[in-house]
Structures are given as structure tokens and as C-alpha cells.
Image (cartoon, rainbow, N blue to C red):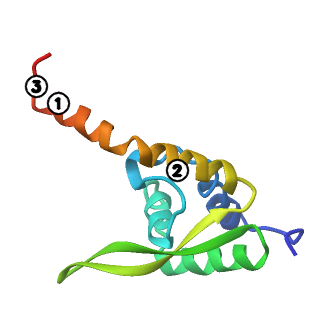
Amino acid sequence: MSQRRMTERQKEILSLLSGSDWYFEVGTQPYSAVDISYLLNMGEKQVSPNAVRETLKLLVKKGLASVDRRKATVFTGLGEIERDLDHYWNVATKEDDEITAKAWSDGAEQRSAEALDRLFGAKP
């Protein structure tokens, strides 16, 4: 099924799921439809999370993307809530992306401490 013609939007979304360097914007893979919509909307495009979600579902159906359900913090007009959200991987790069995501996550605490030190001028 993955041999079917892909639209430009599908190609663009699949490339955003692949070995991304968007760590400082939205973190590491896997990404939700909201994450992908945010990245697409950084340019001149205006793409709704619902449109992205539908494209991601098609990519899963074609066998080009896979989906995990994960807890995520969602910001609403009433504050923050924890919800289960679908997060997507590019099947072709998932193994490498998982390794990168783990390495990024494992170093998060140290990066945060170093950033705070630089921000508040810790003395050597």
C-alpha cells in the first residue's frame, strides 16, 4: 500500500517525522498532530491540527508512519490537563529516532542545570 502516490503534504509531514532537529521547538520524536501543525505553521502555511491528524492517519494506513498513545500535558483555557494523545513516528527512521530521543531525554537534566547557571551567572 505504501507504493501509492503521495501528496506534497504527506511527503512534508513524513519528513518532519524523520530524524528531526526540532528539539528546541517541540522536543524529540514522536510528534503529535499539534506538534506537526505548529512546525508547518512556522512558515507561511496555516494548517490545522485536524488536517494534520487526518494526513497522519493516512500515512499510518499506508504503513509509512506508526502511532503510539502517550500521556501529554495539554494547555486549555482552564489550565493544564493530562491527556492521552496519539504521537507518530516515521516507520523508516523510527529505530534511529528512538535512540536520538532517548539520548536527548537522558541529558535533559544536565542541559537545564547548565542553562540556569548561564542564565543567572553562576560563578566558576
- For the residue pair 42 and 89, the one nearer the viewer reads as 89
Circle 1 SS class: helix
Q: Residue at x 39, y 51 (%)?
A: 25
Q: Quadrant of the C terminus?
A: top left
In the rendered image, residue 83, in percent from the top left (x then y), is placed at 37, 81
Split into 4 quadrants, where in the image is the N terminus?
Answer: bottom right
Number of residues whose C-alpha sits closer than 10 Å to that of mark 2, classed few (under 14), some (14–19) or many (20 or more): some
| Tag shown at residue 121 | 3
Instruction: Say above or below: 22 vs 90.
Output: above
Q: Amino acid at mark 3?
A: Gly
> As shown in the figure, which amino acid type bears the numbered disc 1?
Asp
Q: Image check: 42 left or right of 76?
A: right
Q: Earlier in the sequence, mark 1 or mark 2?
A: 2
In whole angstroms, how far apart are the C-alphas of marks 3 and 1?
6 Å
Q: Secondary structure at mark 2?
A: helix
Tell me where residue 61 appears, x and y as whole percent: 75, 80
Q: What residue did someone put label 1 on?
A: 117
Outermost residue to the top: 124
Discs 3, 1 touching: Cβ within 8 Å: yes
Q: Earlier in the sequence, mark 3 or mark 2?
A: 2
Asked if the residues shown at circle 3 and circle 2 are in contact, with their CB atoms under 8 angstroms apart, the answer is no
Q: Quadrant of residue 90?
A: bottom right
Q: Report the residue marked by disc 2.
A: 101
Label pair 1/2, CB-CB below 8 angstroms: no
Dot 3 falls on a residue whose secondary structure is loop
